[in-house]
Image: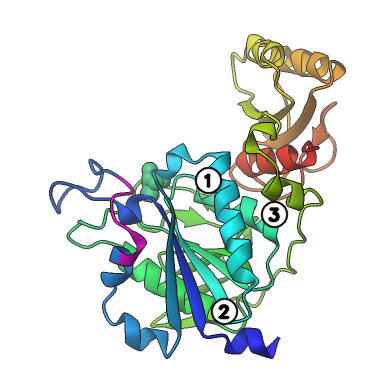
Amino acid sequence: MASEINSKNVVVLGTGGTIAGTAATAADHTGYTAAQLGVQQLLGAVPGLQDALQGHTLVCEQVAQLDSKDMDHATWQALAVRCAHWLAQPDVRGIVITHGTDTLEETTWFLQTVLAPAKPVVLTCAMRPATALVPDGPQNLLDALTVVRDPLARGVLAVCAGSIHGAREVRKVHPYRLDAFSSGEAGPLGWVEQGQVRWAGRRAPGESAHPNATRALAGAVANWPWVAVLHSHAGADARQVQSLVSAGVKGIVLAGTGNGTVHKALLAALLEAQAKGVTVRLITRCAQGQIVGQPAALQAAPAGLNPYKARISLMLDLLD
Ligand code: ASP
């Protein structure tokens, strides 16, 4: 344990995103191209980085270069394998990952559930491209480097706009503002203030690795089962379920209304899908809270996940 805390290397893995994005003008916050700059360039844009590192050494690696709206299972697997490699090195304190904001919450949950690392893995991002008049990426990266070196940091975390979020709770809640992430009712795990971490009193117990984690890291991603997310809503149509079933879907996460209520047209089709061997899990589409009790004839997804994280967990459940 002591050797981990004294470890001097921090690994920074680049994957792209707006933090690495560029626009034609400094005023443009939306018409940019994500994933243009390498991780080394991102670090080069952080003023006072060497002083802030206080003797820690950075090791950089570009694992991917994509807009995270296009995140795919192969990139997840490659990223998890590189994380596992670096986390196993005794001289590595932890990992920072630069990532797009759109699917950051999904990657955070995927890495937590397949790695369940004792050391910290901190994802960070930006809402403005690197070319903006006042970009948020350099501060977020600096904050992530502060968190990863903190003795109390562990597991997969997300850092954005001065807040530290846990893998289970974090979700993107705003398409434009800099403080785009929230942990909902749970609140953030802590904050980064003037280069110091202030943890909230609550430190959740570490999440354990999924029983199929090793298989997810080793096997071909083409064999990962197809799991889709559907939403219940006014005017819902059973044909979306029937089309998925005939196309070979293995699992469906249904984001139900309210306390897990499901439109009657969808419910009938989902029960039929279940009878044909498709695994169906129910979750609420509400931004906060979780299903209380057992309101429908469908099994609930694990508590506290949003539909997209529940999709990841069901996909790992179905992996064989
Ligand atoms: N579309 C971008 C991405 O997710 C958005 C961002 O990073 O803010 O890569």
Is 230 on the left or on the right of 278, as rendered? Answer: left
Q: CA distance from mark 3 to mark 1?
A: 14 Å
**Residue 161 visible in this rendered orientation of the protein:** yes
Q: Secondary structure at mark 3?
A: helix
Q: Are marks 3 and 1 in contact (CB under 8 Å)?
A: no
Q: Is residue 197 magenta?
A: no
Callout in the foreground (3, 1): 1
Task: State the image quarter where residue 31 is shown.
Answer: top left
Q: Residue at x 26, y 77 (%)?
A: 47
Residue stretch rendered in magenta on the structure? 34-40
Q: Residue furthest left?
A: 25
Task: State the image quarter where residue 108 is shown.
Answer: bottom right
Residue that carries the numbered disc 1 in the rendered image:
75
What amino acid type should be assigned to the residue bearing mark 2? Arg
Task: Give the crowd class for mark 1: few <14, some 14-19, many >=20 residues within 10 Å.
Answer: some
Is 24 on the left or on the right of 257, as rendered? Answer: left
Q: CA distance from mark 3 to mark 2?
A: 19 Å
Could you say where residue 193 lies in the image, as x and y percent from the top left?
Answer: 42, 79
Earlier residue among tags 3 and 1: 1
Could you say where residue 226 lies in the image, as x and y percent from the top left?
Answer: 67, 28
> Relative to 84, is 269 above or below?
above
- Quadrant in which the C terminus is drawn: top right
Task: Give the crowd class for mark 3: few <14, some 14-19, many >=20 residues within 10 Å.
Answer: many
Earlier residue among tags 1 and 2: 1
What amino acid type should be assigned to the residue bearing mark 3? Val
Q: Secondary structure at mark 2?
A: strand
Q: Are marks 3 and 2 in contact (CB under 8 Å)?
A: no
For residue 93, which numbered disc appears in the image?
2
Is 257 on the left or on the right of 271, as rendered? Answer: left
What amino acid type should be assigned to the residue bearing mark 1? Thr
For residue 114, which numbered disc appears in the image?
3
